[in-house]
Amino acid sequence: VPTPRPHSFVTGVIHPWRVSAFERLLWRACRGYLVASFVEMPEPLEDPDTGESVTWVIFLISYWGEQIGQKIRKISDCFHCQVYPYPESEASRAETLNGLLSQIQDLSVVLEESEQYLAQVLDKVVLALPTWRVQVQKMKAIYLVLNQCSLDVTEKCLIAEVWCPVRDLTQVQDALRQGSSGSSVECFVQRIPTMESPPTLIRTNKFTAGFQSIVDAYGVASYQEVNPAPYAIITFPFIFAIMFGDVGHGLLMFLFALWMVLYENRPSLQQASNEIWQMFFEGRYLILLMGAFSIYTGFIYNECFSKPTVIFPSAWSVATMANRSSWSSDYLATHPSLTLDPNITGVFQGPYPFGIDPIWSLATNHLNFLNSFKMKMSVVLGIVHMAFGVLLGVFNHVHFKQRHRLVLELLPEVVFLLALFGYLVFLIFYKWIKFGPADSRVAPSILIHFIDMFLFTSNADNLPLYEGQVVPVQMVLVVLALASVPVLLLGTPLYLCCQRRSEGVGLCPDPPPPKHTDTHNAPPLSPQHTDFSDVFMHQAIHTIEYCLGCISNTASYLRLWALSLAHAQLSEVLWSMVMRKGFVRLSYAGGAVLVPVFAVFAVLTVAILLVMEGLSAFLHALRLHWVEFQNKFYVGAGYKLCPFAFAPDSWE
């Protein structure tokens, strides 16, 4: 009997997607002189080449013959298998296994101790990390500035050209003197003349920053131009409140902003990552004023969550038109809809002390009364706001030494605005004063008078408000307004033309002046930009914009009336649909559902009336300031001064 040949083993691991090809190649190359077993690892391990986690496959191959073994090893190398030695005897394999287990245990102890040590190191690093981060950021900011400097001829110092406010020159010199102490090269500051337009620096604090951001969103002020932000601190919240006037809603907004103001130093509020919250937090003082002004206008409208408040006794004495006796309970029960008639003697006892009389909420004609009041109020406030914007141009003309524009531009603008729309405001107040409740049915229409004013006619059915209204008052005002148009159109171009000729310099077709958002308020044309066609074109555009804008902008202020009416009606509908139907009509069962019904009312109030309506009123107030107010005097064609600071936003 021949002695059986000893068999040998090859063991290792292989990638799982190579197993099938590896097995087929072994079988064909070795012609079956082997026995192969494949088993997946119980846990995935990291691939040392790619770093990915792989569930490796362990293989054990038993073969006969040295040539077969060489083939198996070569094939294993081709498939990038990790081959490990496999002892022949059982005792050697057990000894190797025990050694591996002992090595694994030792490595586990080392790793655990290393993790504990690293945890201790990281705990200490965490304490110093904020300081290190600040230091690195400061170094980064400093090197960023140094890289923008240029070397001098000797290559021993740096030269930098920067814009610096005159107020801060002393601080800059002191900083350079302190920084150059102990150095062989002395640092100094030298003022350099330049023809470039300087940047604009407007110093703000936490209160004025929000209002300045609103103005800068339209355009950064040109150098030394009138800044609308100080005036917007009052006008913006007030115009917002006209559209949002409600005591209850304004109080909620005020309390929310007051909470942010009182806890503004908390890091959790300052460092919140939510972008919407950051917008609210940065505008907390703006929201505070908007809420306060909304409370004031809410008292004027006498609305608190759409319901009137009886602060003072009503100025109306409810009586019938027939016998002047008090309405009885039976009469009120059968007549749920009552119309207030101011023309009844003895009914109206004088004006309400403050705001609108709460009795109007019970009348069916209260909407007509409020519409008339709010519409005329919007026109009056809008014309006053625009006139104020026109008058602010005086400061620009005087500061930039363009006194000819006071006579040739500002004066015609004021005459055109006041002769037409200022006269409309006069008619509104005159009609309020002259005509009382007894004359309400024969009071003339202001709108018809205003239309007839442009047609130089009078309507026989619409009586004049005062003697001499059509001739000569309205006729003279229209003539003045029309006469101001050619002065506004040709005054500045002809003045510049005469000025250049008196200086002995002819007009030349140089390149046109730089474009601005408002051609009227653009900086003065420099001597080289004196082509008459360019000057006349810019002045013609401004004249058309201003004359048509006075009409369209006045109509645009009617959004104050529309938004105020929409807010009041939405609030009233919300009260009627939720609180009245959900609680009042449930009689005794209403007490049980008061909490959920009020919760629904509160959620809808915050979501619709505070957030949606508040955002709508904010956007409309923003438009009225940008378009109707600021375009009367503000260019906004400058650029900000970005001073060096260690704040990351200033240099990243």
Image (tube, grey):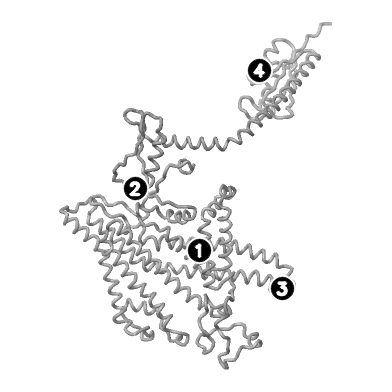
448 up-or-down from 482: above or below: below
Q: CA separation, marks 2 and 4? A: 77 Å
The secondary element bearing badge 3 is classed as helix
Which numbered disc, 1 or 3, marks the residue that appears first in the sequence?
A: 3
- The circle on residue 198 is 2
How many numbered discs?
4
**What's the residue at 61%, 89% (across, down)?**
326
The residue indicated by pointer 1 is 617
The N terminus lies in which quarter of the figure?
top right
Q: Position of residue 54 (x, y in %)?
A: 67, 29
Q: Earlier in the sequence, mark 4 or mark 3?
A: 4
Q: Which amino acid does the dot numbered 1 rest on?
A: Ala
Q: Earlier in the sequence, mark 2 or mark 1?
A: 2
Q: Report the residue at 57% width, 55% height from top.
A: 262
State which quadrant residue 603 falls in: bottom right
Looking at the image, is mark 2 or mark 4 earlier in the sequence? 4
Judge from the rendering whether residue 428 lies leftward or rightward of residue 78; answer left or right: left
Please tell me whether mark 1 sits on a helix, a strand or a loop: helix
Instruction: Say which residue label 4 marks.
Output: 75
Give how far apart the Cα atoms at labels 2 and 1 are.
Answer: 36 Å
In the picture of the structure, the residue carrying the numbered disc 3 is 586
Contact (Cβ within 8 Å) of mark 2 with mark 1: no
Picture coordinates of residue 129 (x, y %)? 58, 36
The residues bearing labels 1 and 3 have C-alpha atoms spaced at a distance of 35 Å
Distance Cα–Cα, label 1 vs label 4: 78 Å
Q: Nearer the viewer, mark 2 or mark 3?
A: 2
